Amino acid sequence: MEAILYIGHGSRSEQGNEQFISFIEETMKLADAPIKEYGFLEKVQPSIFEAAEKCIHQGAGKLTVVPVLLLPGIHANVDIPTELTKVKQAFPELTIQYGNPIGSHEQVTEILLDRMEETGFADSKEEVVLLVGHGSRDQEAAAEFSRVAAGLTKRIFAKVETGYLKADPSFDDRLGHMAKDGGKRIYLVPVLLFTGGFTDQINNKASLVRRAFPACEIVVCRPVGFDDKLMAVLNERAAEAKT
């Protein structure tokens, strides 16, 4: 039998993990597979190995693994495959198919637009957008984040820029430059699933820049998060991995 295994990163926040589980349970209801389970890369149980074992004990001979990550990077390209290698070594008869992260899917663009519009975005010449990502030392992640920005750029007239919390160009520097350059209204959109303390970091920096540039209005949007629009995307990634 076939199984789909959804892998989340795992968060220190119990609330964040509960949001993930609730989201994935709804996603699994829409999935085309007799066996469906979820696991976490770190911090939370079940682990990837434990979740794979649950699938196998239910009769799975083929396992399609979907990383519930917005972008490729070390987690998607190295960490999760490393754990899957351990599963394969323990169960050599198991066929494992590995899917892609969510990436620059058109539904991500729709979610970004939703986040901006719910805070008053009007796509005027006085508005600019700063997409805020986590950042990764993996160049593939940066390339995919640029494609996310390009997808949004195609849909709006306002200028779209990018910055990172943990990489260059840094979100802090980019926001400061945008405010200094005369941005009248800057929309900060966190391109994140698990937010953790990152939302606080973004809000704190926005407050500092507001005080330094009182003529500049800075709007912090909700993160992408576990939006319902992503459910179909994850199952699309599962279907792609099977082909």
Image: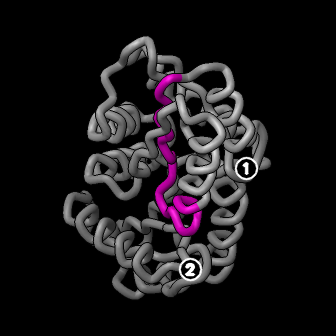
Relative height, residue 197 to residue 140 (above, below): below
Q: Nearest the camera: 138 or 239?
A: 138
In the rendered image, which residue does mark 2 sit on?
Answer: 12
- The residue type indicated by label 1 comes to Ser
Q: Position of residue 184 (x, y in %)?
A: 50, 23
In the rendered image, the quadrant that contains the C terminus is: top left
Tell me the residue at 52%/18% (across/down).
Answer: 159
* Residue 191: in magenta span: yes
Q: Nearest the camera: 9 or 128?
A: 128
- The residue type indicated by label 2 comes to Arg
Residue 144 visible here = no
Q: Position of residue 101 (x, y in %)?
A: 52, 49
* Residue 236: in magenta span: no
Residue 108 visible here = yes
Q: CA distance from mark 1 to mark 2?
A: 19 Å
Tell me the residue at 54%/75% (across/down).
Answer: 11
Q: Residues within 10 Å of mark 2 (few under 14, many from 20)?
A: few
Q: Nearest the camera: 18 or 84?
A: 18
Q: Nearer the viewer, mark 1 or mark 2?
A: 2
Magenta stretch in the rendered image: 184-200
Query: Does dot 1 land on a helix, a strand or a loop?
Result: loop
In the rendered image, which residue does mark 1 sit on?
Answer: 136
Query: Does dot 2 land on a helix, a strand or a loop?
Result: loop
Relative height, residue 77 to residue 26 (above, below): above
